[in-house]
Protein backbone atom coordinates (compact mmCIF):
# COMPACT_ATOMS: atom_id res chain seq x y z
CA UNK A 1 0.00 0.00 0.00
CA UNK A 2 1.39 3.40 -0.92
CA UNK A 3 1.84 6.16 1.60
CA UNK A 4 -0.83 8.17 -0.23
CA UNK A 5 -3.43 5.37 0.06
CA UNK A 6 -2.60 4.89 3.72
CA UNK A 7 -3.00 8.62 4.36
CA UNK A 8 -6.34 8.70 2.52
CA UNK A 9 -7.71 5.82 4.59
CA UNK A 10 -6.50 7.37 7.83
CA UNK A 11 -8.10 10.72 6.94
CA UNK A 12 -11.34 8.96 6.02
CA UNK A 13 -11.43 7.16 9.39
CA UNK A 14 -10.68 10.36 11.28
CA UNK A 15 -13.40 12.23 9.36
CA UNK A 16 -15.93 9.49 10.16
CA UNK A 17 -15.00 9.54 13.85
CA UNK A 18 -15.36 13.33 13.99
CA UNK A 19 -18.77 13.18 12.31
CA UNK A 20 -19.96 10.60 14.85
CA UNK A 21 -18.60 12.75 17.69
CA UNK A 22 -20.36 15.87 16.39
CA UNK A 23 -23.61 13.89 16.12
CA UNK A 24 -23.28 12.61 19.70
CA UNK A 25 -22.53 16.11 21.06
CA UNK A 26 -25.63 17.46 19.29
CA UNK A 27 -27.70 14.64 20.79
CA UNK A 28 -26.39 15.38 24.30
CA UNK A 29 -27.02 19.12 23.92
CA UNK A 30 -30.66 18.46 23.06
CA UNK A 31 -31.20 16.18 26.07
CA UNK A 32 -32.83 17.79 29.10
CA UNK A 33 -30.51 18.33 32.05
CA UNK A 34 -31.15 16.75 35.47
CA UNK A 35 -33.15 18.96 37.83
CA UNK A 36 -32.90 19.15 41.61
CA UNK A 37 -35.89 20.07 43.77
CA UNK A 38 -36.39 20.36 47.51
CA UNK A 39 -39.65 20.79 49.40
CA UNK A 40 -40.49 21.04 53.09
CA UNK A 41 -43.70 20.18 54.88
CA UNK A 42 -45.18 18.24 51.96
CA UNK A 43 -48.46 16.71 53.12
CA UNK A 44 -51.93 15.95 51.74
CA UNK A 45 -51.99 18.64 49.05
CA UNK A 46 -50.16 17.95 45.77
CA UNK A 47 -47.04 20.10 45.34
CA UNK A 48 -45.89 20.75 41.78
CA UNK A 49 -42.24 19.96 41.15
CA UNK A 50 -42.21 20.64 37.38
CA UNK A 51 -44.92 21.77 34.98
CA UNK A 52 -43.66 20.74 31.55
CA UNK A 53 -42.13 17.27 31.64
CA UNK A 54 -42.39 15.94 28.05
CA UNK A 55 -41.82 12.25 28.80
CA UNK A 56 -41.02 9.68 31.48
CA UNK A 57 -38.56 10.47 34.26
CA UNK A 58 -36.39 8.65 36.75
CA UNK A 59 -36.17 10.22 40.19
CA UNK A 60 -33.60 9.74 42.93
CA UNK A 61 -35.27 10.78 46.17
CA UNK A 62 -34.93 11.18 49.92
CA UNK A 63 -37.88 11.56 52.30
CA UNK A 64 -37.63 12.69 55.92
CA UNK A 65 -40.52 13.03 58.33
CA UNK A 66 -40.79 16.75 59.08
CA UNK A 67 -41.45 16.16 62.79
CA UNK A 68 -38.50 14.33 64.30
CA UNK A 69 -36.49 14.29 61.07
CA UNK A 70 -36.50 10.49 60.78
CA UNK A 71 -35.44 9.09 57.41
CA UNK A 72 -38.47 7.63 55.69
CA UNK A 73 -36.98 6.48 52.38
CA UNK A 74 -34.14 6.94 49.93
CA UNK A 75 -34.25 5.19 46.58
CA UNK A 76 -34.82 5.51 42.84
CA UNK A 77 -38.17 5.39 41.05
CA UNK A 78 -39.41 5.81 37.51
CA UNK A 79 -42.73 7.27 36.43
CA UNK A 80 -44.28 7.52 32.96
CA UNK A 81 -46.63 10.17 31.61
CA UNK A 82 -50.10 9.78 33.17
CA UNK A 83 -48.60 7.52 35.82
CA UNK A 84 -47.88 7.50 39.53
CA UNK A 85 -45.62 5.61 41.89
CA UNK A 86 -45.62 5.34 45.67
CA UNK A 87 -42.24 6.42 47.00
CA UNK A 88 -43.11 5.45 50.57
CA UNK A 89 -45.76 3.19 52.06
CA UNK A 90 -45.40 2.41 55.76
CA UNK A 91 -47.14 3.08 59.07
CA UNK A 92 -50.35 4.13 57.35
CA UNK A 93 -48.53 6.84 55.34
CA UNK A 94 -48.27 6.76 51.57
CA UNK A 95 -46.17 9.32 49.68
CA UNK A 96 -46.78 9.48 45.92
CA UNK A 97 -44.96 10.90 42.91
CA UNK A 98 -47.26 11.50 39.92
CA UNK A 99 -46.73 12.66 36.35
CA UNK A 100 -49.89 13.91 34.63
CA UNK A 101 -50.61 13.39 30.93
CA UNK A 102 -50.02 17.14 30.55
CA UNK A 103 -46.51 16.89 32.02
CA UNK A 104 -47.00 18.12 35.60
CA UNK A 105 -44.77 16.26 38.08
CA UNK A 106 -46.16 16.38 41.63
CA UNK A 107 -45.46 14.94 45.07
CA UNK A 108 -48.07 14.37 47.76
CA UNK A 109 -48.85 12.35 50.87
CA UNK A 110 -51.86 10.40 49.62
CA UNK A 111 -52.65 8.60 52.90
CA UNK A 112 -51.79 9.08 56.57
CA UNK A 113 -50.98 12.12 58.66
CA UNK A 114 -47.21 12.72 58.50
CA UNK A 115 -45.58 15.59 56.63
CA UNK A 116 -42.30 15.18 54.77
CA UNK A 117 -39.22 17.06 53.68
CA UNK A 118 -38.33 15.91 50.20
CA UNK A 119 -35.23 16.06 48.01
CA UNK A 120 -35.48 14.99 44.37
CA UNK A 121 -33.05 14.63 41.49
CA UNK A 122 -35.20 14.37 38.36
CA UNK A 123 -33.58 12.67 35.36
CA UNK A 124 -35.57 12.90 32.12
CA UNK A 125 -35.35 9.65 30.15
Image (cartoon, rainbow, N blue to C red):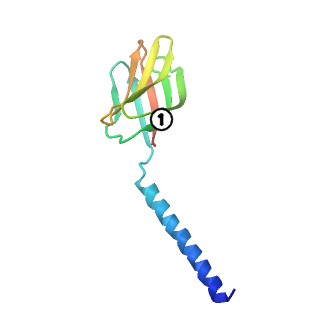
The answer to whether residue 18 shows anywhere in this view is yes
The answer to whether residue 98 shows anywhere in this view is no
| Quadrant of the image occupied by residue 79 | top left
- In the rendered image, the residue lying farthest to the right is 1
**Residue 30 placed where, x, y %?**
40, 55
**Residue count near mark 1 (Cα–Cα under 10 Å), binned few <14, some 14–19, many ≥20:** many
Residue at image mark 1: 59
**Residue 50 placed where, x, y %?**
35, 37
Residue 7 against residue 18 in the figure, above or below: below
In the picture, the quarter occupied by the N terminus is bottom right
- Residue at 32% x, 21% y: name it: 45
**Residue 88 placed where, x, y %?**
49, 21
Residue 56 against residue 41 in the figure, above or below: below
Q: Who is closer to the viewer here, 6 or 21?
A: 6
- Residue at 62% x, 84% y: name it: 7
**Residue 60 placed where, x, y %?**
50, 35
Q: Who is closer to the viewer here, 72 or 122?
A: 122
**Element on which disc 1 rests:** strand
- Residue at 63% x, 85% y: name it: 5
Amino acid sequence: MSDWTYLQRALSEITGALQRLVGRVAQLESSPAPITWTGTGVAGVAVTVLTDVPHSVTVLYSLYETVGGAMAATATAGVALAGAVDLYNAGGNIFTLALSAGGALTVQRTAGASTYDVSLLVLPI
